[in-house]
Amino acid sequence: MTQTHHVTSREIGMIRIYLKPADKAPRALSKSRWGAKPLYRALVTQAKADGIMNAVAHHTHYGFSNHGPVRENGAEISDPHLTMCVELIGSKDQLELFCRAQGALLADKVIVYKHLEHWHVGPGELAHEDASPDQLAAEAD
């Protein structure tokens, strides 16, 4: 079987920021005339501007955060105090810089960092300098 693609990996990280959908960004960050922008939207927008690889907001249905009460969404009305999560993926340095720059917005939030490995799958042959001694020996046969 001929391999037509290779996989390369590099270390990256992920932070999860737990907050409430009702949390608002300061008006200075909101371009809306109708009121303050939700904090989760401001964080995702700022992550994009800062060049972070991936940023998503996850709404939850049931849970609690920071030792608060257990909350749940109702059948017809969502609970604006139910915990949600903003997840950012990028280099550890980028994520640390983001948190320092957004420190005023992130105060008192539960933030969790996790080490990840990013895989890139692309076409191509094994480069000679990337090959292990065993791979080079097999190639010579």
Image (cartoon, rainbow, N blue to C red):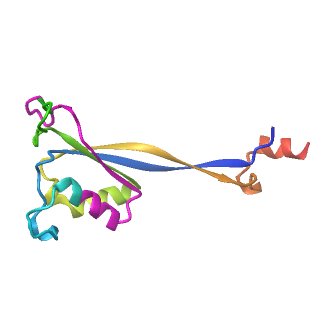
126 displayed left or right of 43: right
Locate residue 92: give its quadrant.
Answer: bottom left
- Is residue 92 a member of the stretch shown in magenta? no
At 24% across and 41% down in the image, what residue appears? 59
Q: Nearest the camera: 114 or 43?
A: 43
Q: Position of residue 72 (x, y in %)?
A: 14, 31
Q: Is residue 89 left or right of residue 40?
A: right
Viewer-proximal residue among 73 and 105? 73
Query: Which residue occupies the foreground of this view, 51 or 30?
Result: 30
Q: Position of residue 46 (x, y in %)?
A: 27, 64
Residue at the limit of the structure toward the front, as seen here: 76
Quadrant containing the N terminus is: top right
Q: Magenta span covers which residues? A: 43-70
Left or right: residue 14 compared with residue 9: left
The residue positioned 73% from the left and 45% from the top of the image is 132
Please provide percent x and percent y for residue 62. Answer: 19, 30
Q: Is residue 116 left or right of residue 79?
A: right
Residue at position x 21%, y 60% in the image: 42
Q: Position of residue 37 (x, y in %)?
A: 15, 61
- Count numbered badges in the picture: 0
Residue at x 31%, y 61% (from the top left corner): 47
Of residues 111 and 33, the one nearer the viewer is: 33
In the rendered image, the quadrant that contains the C terminus is top right
Q: Is residue 69 above or below residue 128?
A: above
Magenta-span inclusion, residue 61 = yes
Question: Is the residue 91 above or below the residue 21 in the image?
Answer: below
